[in-house]
Image: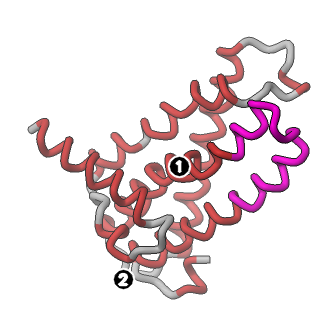
Amino acid sequence: MPSMIEDEIRNALRGCLEIPLYLKIGATRFVGTLNAFKRSIFVPIFLIPVILCVLPTAEIYAGKSLGWQATLMLMQIIIGTGVFAGVLYFFKPKSVTRDDFLKCMTAYNWLSLSAFVVNIPIILLAVFGINTWDDVFAMMMLTTLYSYSFLAYMIIYVLRVSLFLGI
């Protein structure tokens, strides 16, 4: 049984590499089961401590504890994923099966890792003082748009829908 989970993780990591490169095979790497979706929820959750340690604290949260900030980020992940799932479910075509929907949600969770990795070089520029956070902010907006584009690409090929619906 553990080898099945290891294969699932290995394939999901390959999908996380292939989808940002706009390779169609990346859409086939994710598993569309409820258990795979439950396991994939931990991917963005495991990124919370890394993000809190690397990024500077906003002035609004300066007096708050690290636990409070982690809870806030967890709530943002849960609400964001819930809204994404609701909108996706509402607009999905009738031809999309439950397994395809779960595969899309699993891929969505895994692609949070890709979005984070894309931002690492830019974050390091600011952390090491090469650029200011103001300079990095503009670059991060571009990488965020890139992340949205490969997310739309994933939706198009996992759910097999038109480009218009994917965007």
- Give the vertical position of 160 relative to 152 (above or below): below
Count residues near mark 1 (Cα–Cα under 10 Å), then give few for <14, some for 14-19, many for 20+. some
Q: Position of residue 24 (x, y in %)?
A: 38, 77
Q: Position of residue 25 (x, y in %)?
A: 32, 73
70 magenta-colored:
no
Which residue is depicted at the point 78% across and 55% down?
139
Query: Quarter-wise, where is residue 128 in the image?
Result: top right
Q: Nearer the viewer, residue 107 or 105?
A: 107
Which residue is depicted at the point 29% across and 60% down?
32
Q: Residue furthest front?
A: 130
Count residues near mark 2 (Cα–Cα under 10 Å), then give few for <14, some for 14-19, many for 20+. few
Q: Position of residue 12 (x, y in %)?
A: 33, 53
Q: On residue 112, which mark appears?
A: 1
Classified by dominant secondary structure, the portion drawn in magenta counts as: helix
Q: CA distance from mark 1 to mark 2?
A: 26 Å
Q: Which segment is the magenta one?
A: 122-143
Q: Position of residue 20 (x, y in %)?
A: 50, 65
Ranked by sequence position, the earlier of labels 1 and 2 is: 2
Identity, as a three-letter code, of the amino acid under mark 2: Ser
* Image quarter in which the C terminus is found: bottom right
Query: Quarter-wise, where is residue 28 in the image?
Result: bottom left
- Colour scheme in use: secondary structure
Query: Quarter-wise, where is residue 143 in the image?
Result: bottom right
Please name which of the two marks, 1 or 2, marks the residue nearer to the observer: 1
Judged from the image, the secondary structure of the residue bearing numbered disc 2 is loop
**Would residue 51 be found to the left or right of residue 5 on screen?**
right
Mark 2 lies on residue: 95
Q: Nearer the viewer, residue 6 or 78?
A: 6
- Give the vertical position of 122 relative to 107 (above or below): above
**Would residue 133 be found to the left or right of residue 21 on screen?**
right
137 magenta-colored:
yes
* Image quarter in which the N terminus is found: top left
